[in-house]
Amino acid sequence: MAASYKKLILNGIFSENPVFRLALSLCPAVAVTTSVRNGFLMGVAVLCVMTMVNITVSILRNLINPKVRIPAYILIIATYVSITEMMMRAYSRTAYKQMGLYIQLIVVFAIIISRAELFASRNKVLPSAADGFGMGLGFLGALVLVGAVRELIGKGSIAGFHITASSPLLIMVLPTGGFFVIGLLMGLFNWIDQRYYGGRPGGGGGGHH
Amino acid sequence: MFKDLFTIFIASAIINNFVFTRYLGLCIFFGVSKKMETALGMSMTFTAVMVISAALSWLVYNLVMLPLHIEFLKIVLFIGIVAGFVQFADTLLKKLNPTLYYKLGIYLVLITTNCIILAVPLLNTDNNYNFLQSITLGLGSGAGFSLALIIMASIRERLELANIPKPFQGMPIAFIVTGLIALAFLGFSGMITI
Amino acid sequence: MDTEKNPQVEARVFRASVGPHISSGESVPHIMWTVSAALLPAAGLSIYYFGLPALSVLVLSIVSAIVFEALAQKLAGAKITISDGSAILTGLLLGMNLPASVPFYLPVIGSAVAVIITKQLFGGLGYNIFNPALIGRAFLMASFPRFMTTWPLPQGSLSLARPDAVTGATPLGILKEEGYRKLLSHFASRHDMYVQLLLGHRGGAMGETGIVALLFGAAYLLYKGYITWHIPVTFIATVAVLTAVFGGDPWLAMLSGGLVLGAFFMATDYVTVPQLKRAQVAFGLGCGIITALIRLEGGYPEGVCYAILLMNCFTPLLDRAFKAKKFGEASAKA
Amino acid sequence: MQEAIQPNLISIVLKSLAFMGGIGAVFGLGLAYAAKKFAVKTDPKVQAVRDALPGANCGACGFAGCQGYAEAVVGDANLSPGLCAPGKADVAALVAKITGKLAPEVIPMVATAFCRGDECKASRRFKYEGVKDCRAAILVAGGDKTCVYGCLGYGTCGKACPFGAITMSRENLPIVDREKCTACGVCVAACPKGIIHLTPAPRKVHILCSSHDKGPAVKKACEIGCIGCGLCAKGCPEGAISMDDNLAVMDYARCTHCETCVLLCPQRTIKDMLDPAKEQAERIKLPKKEPQAKAAGGK
Amino acid sequence: MNSKDIIKITLNLVAICAVAGVILSVVWAVTNPVRLEKKAEELRAAQKALVPQAQNITEALKFVSAGGKEGVIYKATADGKTVGYIIKAYAKGYSSFIEMLVAVDIDYRIIGIQILSEQETPGLGAEMEKKWFKDQFRGKTEDHLIVMKGETKTDIQAISGATISSRAVTNGVKAAVDALRAERAKDRAL
Amino acid sequence: MRITSFKGGVHPPDNKKATASLPIVDAALPERVVIPMSMHIGAPAKPIVGVGDLVKKGRKIGEAQGAVSVPVHASISGKVMAVGNFPSPMGVDAQAVVIESDGKDEWADDISGHDDYLSLNPDVLRNIIKEAGIVGMGGATFPSHVKLSPPKEKKIRYAILNGAECEPYLTADARLMEENPGDIIEGLKIIMTILRVTDGFVGIEDNKKAAIKAMSAEAGKVACELMVETYYERDGIQYEVPKGCKMGVKVIPLPVKYPQGSEKQLIKAVTGLEVPPGHLPMDVGAVVQNVATAAAIYQAVRFGRPLIERVLTVTGPGINEPKNLRVRIGTLFEDVISQCGGINKKAAKVVMGGPMMGIAQADFGVPVIKGTSGIVALSEKEAVNVMDFGPCIRCGRCIDVCPMGLNPSVLGRLIEKGRFEEAKEYGLLDCFECGSCSFVCPSGRPMVQFTKWAKRELARKKAKAS
Ligand SMILES: Cc1cc2nc3c(=O)[nH]c(=O)nc-3n(C[C@H](O)[C@H](O)[C@H](O)COP(=O)(O)O)c2cc1C
Ligand SMILES: Cc1cc2nc3c(=O)[nH]c(=O)nc-3n(C[C@H](O)[C@H](O)[C@H](O)COP(=O)(O)O)c2cc1C
Ligand SMILES: Cc1cc2nc3c(=O)[nH]c(=O)nc-3n(C[C@H](O)[C@H](O)[C@H](O)COP(=O)(O)O)c2cc1C
Ligand SMILES: Cc1cc2nc3c(=O)[nH]c(=O)nc-3n(C[C@H](O)[C@H](O)[C@H](O)CO)c2cc1C
Ligand code: SF4
Ligand code: SF4
Ligand code: SF4
Ligand code: SF4
Ligand code: FES
């Protein structure tokens, strides 16, 4: 049993990584990952929302009429996001200023609704929580990774610790750089996958909506 | 007045294009830009939903929520309007025009998970836009998203004839292309500030 | 069959293919080398003006373009095709798009972005969507704006200008920041200004300055048929007309910035522009409009680079929109 | 603005409640009404079949992609549920279950290339120049191999295989990865020389030549081609091999992997692909009605 | 489906909505005062940092700043005397509106400036938040609110590569001072 | 009068010097001939002789199968040695009859002609042409009687002879026009009689001055009268041309440009009319025949001789003694080449036909067929190597030169990725494989191979579907 929870969580982190594999919830992955810190904060917010949504949906799964399933799930997500937003706005104002908009946009992240629909609505509470947690962790990891690369190349620092004196490639902290970094990382992962695990070409997700 | 609306339109459609300069709506952008046909279908559907939801959101927000001082429910409301409307349209279309539904139905569902659909009403309220301005922003954003989709679809169709290294086929190269387009769109930076 | 009769004939193994069995003898390397050669006068002039730093920037960008091309192809397991000359041309054009004063690592990074990301990731020659050299430049612009907007003064002795003329800014920069009058005050007369601009004695990227030399090379390419008038002429004319319409000086608009270099050498890159002549006219028009828009309204003094890149985005669309006219189609309708 | 007013908790909660309740009522009524008024029947079976199919869209079933087959197999009561070759028996059983049809007996097949005339063993009669694709290469004098039946070696089959099961050897012969091959038959259709055949997967003794040329002509063109001597046919204790216009042909239903023919063939055309480790396990008998199944699988 | 189903579905959704509404309103009721408090605190801290000697800072009036946004003039008093003004103003920058506080003494000499929010390019325009840039304004009078591209002590030195942003801030400061001057001309009590 | 030619086209070096001034010589009687049953477009003929049969020259040995087909005749007298599959210059083995010469070269007994050939009924003429096995000798080998039987509703106004010979190296048609203008013009008159038209044209590229002169002189003599009732339509008006009306033949010098000899391009140059995509020349009222075809028609009608020999040019740097030869159909290439001094070291690629559209030959054990206009041995240097063709650099040269106004660049890129259906939307089927695009392509892309390949795949798919 424990092993399968582990599998669920690892699934979210690697084989179905929301950003690199499923290509979902890309906006924040590009826009807010200018540093490890931002990526981390955004990731944590998503992690919390996802886990809570999955738990809630799983609990309510037999109470919600299938005809209004989607609106109900969206409502649940929106509620959690609103709560997160209001909390951040009150207690973490600097972070909020930097990514307030994207926090609000968590509502529409396809990854959340799709997990609610595909997993939580069909599974018990604990597995749902594990799935949400795993997916959220995968998302968090992806954002931190992208943030780290961009911060390193763009600002010459990692998590705020300066490594080089001047900022090397400014473009990396512009969102344009986010596209390059994610594209190149995806390519790299595909290459590793194809080279060492015989993965299928043209991976990197897409079309999983 | 007209000039103001024109500026909002041009800014949101081109200069501050949501996809290339604000980095919103990316999932759907990458998802449906593989073929020109789907890109066109999504463009039309999206623009229509965008305008309608901008109008509905403005009405409910300004006529109901503001007087009641319950603005904090706006996220719930905005996304609720989109989701409700989309599901409604979905049901309706399936019955009334199955061919159109077959063409556009898949996009309808995707729209609820597009950042832009939520960002636009949020921006409208942030900027205290009036009704016309709100609709114009919706229209401009829809047009801008359509433009982005169509450009991307045409490029990706050309890329299908290219010899892209295997690991980069599909999503990775799409990201790189978008990065390059965004780099080109930097040329517009500093042109209009909103 | 009785094939032993002519053993001399039978023993040979011949080549065979589908026709045509002869060709015009035109080849990709030949084209690329010729275009590179056409750029040499302008490159020479900029070396004359800006001295050894200019030479080193050019050499660095060319060499690194070649090295990165070979490296990328090696990594991808593809055939190494540096001898086709396209990487050299990309490197040369990238170098000519930079100020002579940039530190050594800029041309290297620019070449890497141009050749690896913009070209080889898309499958190499012929498949890229964006002009590699210009992406290299835009990338550097976004990464090192300070270096990329600091223009050294020409040092050559051809100068006819007064000693204090054009202090490190491009004419378009001065125009944008300080206005036409101020710009004019740097020269003896309006006429003098045009002559100076033609001769290239002014701040700017290396390839922007020697307009005469560029025109000379462009004329040769036009004569050889390697480029056609469609894009350059519409591009330049559109900029001139729009500038005039909005009250600017069309001659200044044509002679300043990277317009000549861009229009003749970069907006003509076969790979990244539409194929049909009618579509090329539309492309040139688009480039002209965007250039004028950025120069007049935008955040930068110069817009040629971004204009071409933005129109590159539209190339596949233009290719779709304008289709070749089939033989007999007109009479089919009639 | 909102900051200015600090209404008390009760009133806020009540207002929210009223507002949200209203919204819920409006949407709920609207959606429920629409769902009722505009209800359309969809056949859940189609979706179920679609989900069961592997989604390769290879067309082996003969329909426009997996969706096409899903619709057809649900709609047409007579259509066999076993047409999806990549899905093999599992999918066939699943589809049969969903559609309430009888699960067909599916004998696993695998693609086998009937030519061993590689670069070293078979000659070419001219220097072909052009597109490296077999179907393009036959445009030049029917292909450059001296043996007109032989594999051209330009790898069209490999490019066509949707499952990446075929790679070209260094000597330019196709190698089928028997694990990856799903017997979809795409390569069979792609090869202009008809080199590739679907053969029963458990059967591993193959006569790997396609040439109907007479012995001397074969010898001139290829070291390893079937010269039509008929030794194998005479020697096979099961009578599994027959001669067809100078070419030995295997009847897989009879072959018992005894390997007599392998030893008899003077040209070493016959090859035993049996994995020695699995040898014992493989020597189970196939039902003799197999040729029909082969025809179905091979389309 | 019959009308009973319709009712059932509706009630289902209404119930969820209602629960959501209640939860959200409670959370809002709890967090909103905290948010307002913190926001006011931030503003106070910024103002206090600009005019440390002020004992009392009160909102005096509002005016229209760049982009039609709302600017505010605060009056800073100590011992009942006006020691200066703090103006919240906006300026149109390179890619965003820059929100800033400008503190001036009663002779319109700049005491200091503070950038509240800005969305300029990181590494370029965003350098305006650096101390060296803001400190340049200290003690300047309107005459010296001019952006120079090179080294300068008397005027404002531009952030290299971001002349537009530098000029935006400088012009914004100037406009803020102008606004104050105009308002004071209208309203002697200010 | 010079009418504007078509748009596009290329100017390959014409390389005709070696043979342009060499008179046509009769090739030696071959010891054996291999006569394929399929030397034409359409259903192959069916052999009607068996091994051991004795045949005389002109004797029918293969019967036409169906409407679009022609019979095949013995080109020498002798004994049938074999009937079976033999290599053919078209690439794949084809059914053929092998005849070993008896050295006597006797005509069959039933050979008889018509002196009053212009007064014969058109249907009779058509039948003679069919029975003589005459097919287009310009390379397309389409049965001539079919071309000369347009459906009633298609009113033919122009009979055009194709003497363009725009392929480099080839001079067979030019020599024929110089040496036998009479046969050609008489053939044209027969064609005009069959089609009931009064306007005949001969289009000749401007670099063949001697041919133009000879043909013009002969055309000037055409003052004969129509022997049969004729009518035609022009601008919507029906004209009756009563018996006795004058025919006129004009020789039109054409701009020197490849592929000037292609039917549609020739019609455009001669009449100014463009045949719409997917249509036939008769849709604009024109019928085009090669000059050698016209001469063959004359021979058949006047003397009753079936098509058993043709003129071809054997040339190129790889041939020791280039020649214009009159060769019996079925003569093996090796026999022809050895009469031209054999092949030398320079030869790297041997092509049947011209270097633009010709078919490369792997060996010389293949026979001359009715469409063989030349054997050209190209040198290593001039024979382009497309083995390592590069990617399309989108230079657009091919678009500029494509005489059909297609976009070969896109076609090539689509086909390269196996997207044949899309290629069809880009006009794949309108490509007539002239090779102008490949000729100019700096990347050496084998566009003709691409289009042939795609057309074949599409046909295969269609055949499978139906
Ligand atoms: C699409 C969108 C874009 C926004 N962009 C900005 C921005 O660039 N800068 C900014 O300060 N606020 C921006 N906001 C507003 C913030 O989300 C938030 O409402 C604002 O920071 C007010 O926070 P406060 O009320 O806690 O002060 C944006 C809002 C939306 C919906
Ligand atoms: C990616 C990018 C971001 C930029 N951001 C800013 C900015 O934030 N502020 C600004 O004033 N100029 C910005 N610029 C504009 C250029 O640096 C412009 O050339 C500069 O403002 C001119 O200033 P200078 O005269 O100091 O070189 C940006 C340019 C690029 C390419
Ligand atoms: C590219 C191309 C070039 C051709 N060149 C000639 C030519 O030079 N001379 C010629 O007689 N036919 C040429 N043809 C064949 C003609 O299109 C046409 O089929 C022929 O003239 C009809 O006469 P026939 O049926 O008597 O051969 C060419 C065809 C093509 C496609
Ligand atoms: C007329 C002409 C113009 C060219 N211009 C450029 C250019 O602006 N930038 C560049 O990187 N390469 C240029 N090239 C080289 C080549 O086309 C380029 O490397 C391709 O884009 C790489 O696929 C040019 C080539 C030609 C023939
Ligand atoms: S090898 Fe052939 S049969 Fe097997 S999967 Fe590939 S294409 Fe299909
Ligand atoms: S088996 Fe057929 S398709 Fe495959 S390489 Fe051989 S000839 Fe080509
Ligand atoms: S596409 Fe066809 S018709 Fe056009 S030039 Fe090429 S071969 Fe000739
Ligand atoms: S001529 Fe060749 S390289 Fe040029 S566009 Fe045509 S196919 Fe491409
Ligand atoms: S995260 Fe923005 S559209 Fe998916």
Image (spheres, coloured by chain):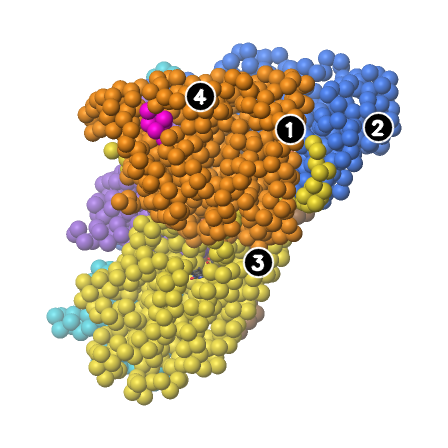
Chain colours: A brown, B purple, C yellow, D blue, E cyan, F orange
Q: Where's residue F79, x and y in %? A: 66, 22
Is the magenta region chiefly helix, strand or loop?
helix
Real-space Cα distance between discs 4 and 1?
A: 25 Å
Neighbour class for label 4 at 10 Å: few (<14), some, many (≥20)? some
F5 left or right of A46 in image: left
Q: Report which residue position mark 3 lands on.
A: C81
| Camera-side residue of E14 and D214 | D214
Q: Mark 2 points at which residue?
A: D265
In the shown orientation, is residue F57 left or right of residue D246?
left
Circle 1: residue type: Gly
**Residue F36: percent from left, percent from top:** 58, 27
Q: How many labels does the image show?
A: 4
Residue situated furthest bottom in the rendering: C163
Is ligand 4 within 8 Å of the beta carbon of the residue shown at mark 3? no
- Kindly identify the amino acid type of the residue bearing the numbered disc 4: Gly
Badge 2 vs badge 1, beta-carbon distance below 8 Å: no
Vertical order, F449 against E152 (above or below)? above
Most foreground residue, E115 or D134: D134
Checking the image for residue F103, the label placed there is: 1
Foreground mark, 3 or 1, reads 1
Relative side of A3 to B132, left or right: right
Residue at 66%, 48% (x, y): give it: A195
Q: Relative to the observer, which residue lies in front, F181 or B161?
A: F181
Indicate the quadrant where residue C293 lies.
Answer: bottom left
Location of residue F403 with respect to F128 vertically, above or below: below
Same chain, labels 3 and 4 = no
